Image (spheres, rainbow, N blue to C red):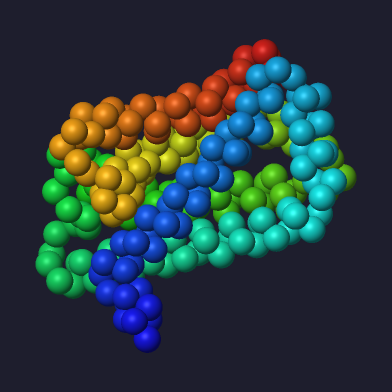
Amino acid sequence: MWFSTFIKSSIGKKWIMAATGLCLFFFLVSHAAGNATLFSSSELFQAYADQLHSHPLIVAVFSNSLLLIFLIHVITGLTLFFQNRQARPTRYRVTARAASNTLASGTMIYSGLCILLFIIIHIINFSLGNKGHQISETVTSLLARPTYSLFYIAAFLFLALHLSHGFWSMLQTFGINHPRYTALIAKLTLIVPLIFLALFGAIPVLIMSGVIT
């Protein structure tokens, strides 16, 4: 009973957001590492994808678990947003942060919804629309289109904005907020999102410029 009461509370929901956010962060790290093989060659990226999908059961369990975590994160985030809007007519904030980023904290719900839209389109194009084609061919074909590449880069700009507050909020929820680490955390909330933006954003740029074929 205590667990049910806890997850229904505001603090419990913040813990759910932090825990699911951490899982999604680790997925993002692994996804970035896999995509980074494109910087070497499309052949290496295809070999990585083939190796990954040579274990269909593992992929299915991982994909379904990731989908569940993502849905929990989205639903809990929306629930917190509307609860906070009802409690007070101000935008959602977890708490006052030492390293202020009012743009990121005040637009979490909107950047999150933009990311959700991107993921839906991403799955349709790269998973459902990948029938009969190698994934490396699909990637280079789609990202060679300027409109899709701009959409792809814009999505990761929103992700960087979302992460800049979400990463800090996660650490705060887990109690990692000692004054000794404030300066380091402030730097990480900028460095970590920028690393992901650079890694993912470079791919469409290099494909459009012909460096990756």
Q: Quadrant of residue 17?
A: bottom left
Instruction: Inspect this view and state whether residue 175 appears.
Output: yes
Q: Position of residue 74 (x, y in %)?
A: 43, 61
Q: Residue at x 82, y 39 (%)?
A: 50
Q: Position of residue 71 (x, y in %)?
A: 50, 64
Q: Quadrant of residue 84?
A: bottom left
Pick the quarter of the image with the N terminus.
Answer: bottom left
Pick the residue in front: 45 or 144: 45
Q: Examine the rendered structure and indicate whether residue 129 appears above or below residue 212.
A: below
Q: Position of residue 169 (x, y in %)?
A: 28, 49
Pick the quarter of the image with the C terminus.
Answer: top right
Q: How many marks?
A: 0
> In the orientation shown, which residue stands out farthest toward the right?
132
Q: Examine the rendered structure and indicate whether residue 114 appears above or below residue 89.
A: above
Pick the residue in front: 28 or 123: 28
Q: Residue at x 15, y 37 (%)?
A: 179
Q: Examine the rendered structure and indicate whether residue 198 appears above or below residue 108.
A: above
Q: Residue at x 60, y 25 (%)?
A: 203
Q: Residue at x 27, y 34 (%)?
A: 185
Side of 15 where 41 appears, left or right? right
Q: Quadrant of residue 148?
A: top right
Q: Examine the rendered structure and indicate whether residue 148 appears above or below residue 59.
A: above
Instruction: Inspect this view and state whether residue 107 appears.
Output: no
Q: Position of residue 89 (x, y in %)?
A: 13, 64
